[in-house]
Image (spheres, rainbow, N blue to C red):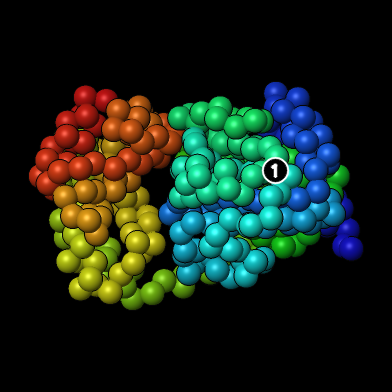
Amino acid sequence: MSVAETKAPHRPSRHASNQNSIAALLSLLGERESFVVTSHARPDGDAIGSALGLMHLLDGMGKRVTVAFADPIPAMYRWLPGAERIQATLPKDAPDAAVLLECDSLERSGFSADAFAAMGAGLTINIDHHRSGKAFAGFNWIDPEANAVGAMVYDVAVASGVTITAAMATCLYVAVLTDTGSFTYQGTSAATFGLAEHLAECGADPYGIAREVYFSNPPGKLRALGAALGHFEIKGRVAWSWITQAEMLRANAVVEDCEGIVNYLIGLEGVEAAVFLRELPSGAEFRLSLRSKGTVDVAQVAERFGGGGHRNASGCTLNGSLDSAIGRIVSELQQG
């Protein structure tokens, strides 16, 4: 055991107001022996990193834990410590508790309510940092001020007294790194960097992680980016772009290759809100990624279409033609 693994963080938890929730959660975890951990469909870095980070924490507490995701893990995260333990189905043996991260319902995980019922978990635990989060579980901890669920899991790990191993630190660092847009989104604070520093001291390798997440892209990702940027348009303070299924096929791209394209749009001078539309395989349906520099609340916009997220980063799905989807979302962003 290294000195770094046992060292306390330089700053206390940023979420000091959540100490009661953390204490209650630790009590629930301590009283139970077996867990299933999952997160939302189409998992991103925070979903995967926080789920694996929580898995390592529960391992350290001497618990039995299964991590399950309904959708495939993107290649850029399959190297994470413990990723080989991720299952594609919920366990058959009933766990004492099911922990859902970043979900506003059981179904948001991609697993059906019937699948959860058949599994028969003794308790459902909901940990979320989205403003659109809902208290659907037996225990709910929703903190919209947290900039990643990984940061919430980190707070629990620190409070637990369990050793933060290099494996846990790596997973939680990836969760926070990716959900803060590489520490660029609003809400990134001194405490965020204190968390990152502590995780690096515990064994997370910032350069090695950046190399895996940002500098190991497949050719299809670059081709998809080229196709999308070839479409981009600006009207006033709103920018948008899109990619069709035909273009995805020509680029030999997969869904994960579209991650981050919207950030090129929001990076334009004078643009305050941006949206990237990806046509879904069903046709006449589009998945939207929305970004803002702060003046437009894209979470409110996404919620009007059944989606949600954060003020500066949200998502939703729209039905209809491409022109219809663009018209509806651009109009809302211009008004927002």
Task: Name the residue: 20% across, 42% down.
Answer: 319
User: How far across and down, in percent of the image, does residue 70 sit?
Assistant: 49, 56
265 or 313: which is nearer to us?
313
Give the quarter of the figure containing the C terminus: top left
Task: Name the residue: 35% across, 30% down.
Answer: 303
Horizontal placement of 294 versus 70: left or right?
left
Q: Give the class, few, some or many, for how many residues have Cα within 10 Å of label 1's Cα (few <14, many ≥20).
A: many
Q: Which residue position is annotated with label 1?
A: 97
Q: Residue furthest front?
A: 118
Horizontal placement of 153 versus 43: left or right?
right
Q: Is residue 105 something that shows in the picture?
A: yes
332 or 324: which is nearer to us?
324
Q: Which image quadrant is residue 250 in?
A: bottom left
Residue 165, placed above or below residue 328: below
User: How far across and down, in percent of the image, does residue 225 sit?
Assistant: 27, 63
User: How far across and down, in percent of the image, does residue 253 sit?
Assistant: 30, 69
Task: Name the residue: 38% across, 39% down.
Answer: 314
Secondary structure at badge 1 equals strand
User: How far across and down, in percent of the image, does residue 327 sit?
Assistant: 13, 37
Three-letter residue code for mark 1: Ala
Horizontal placement of 195 versus 177: left or right?
right
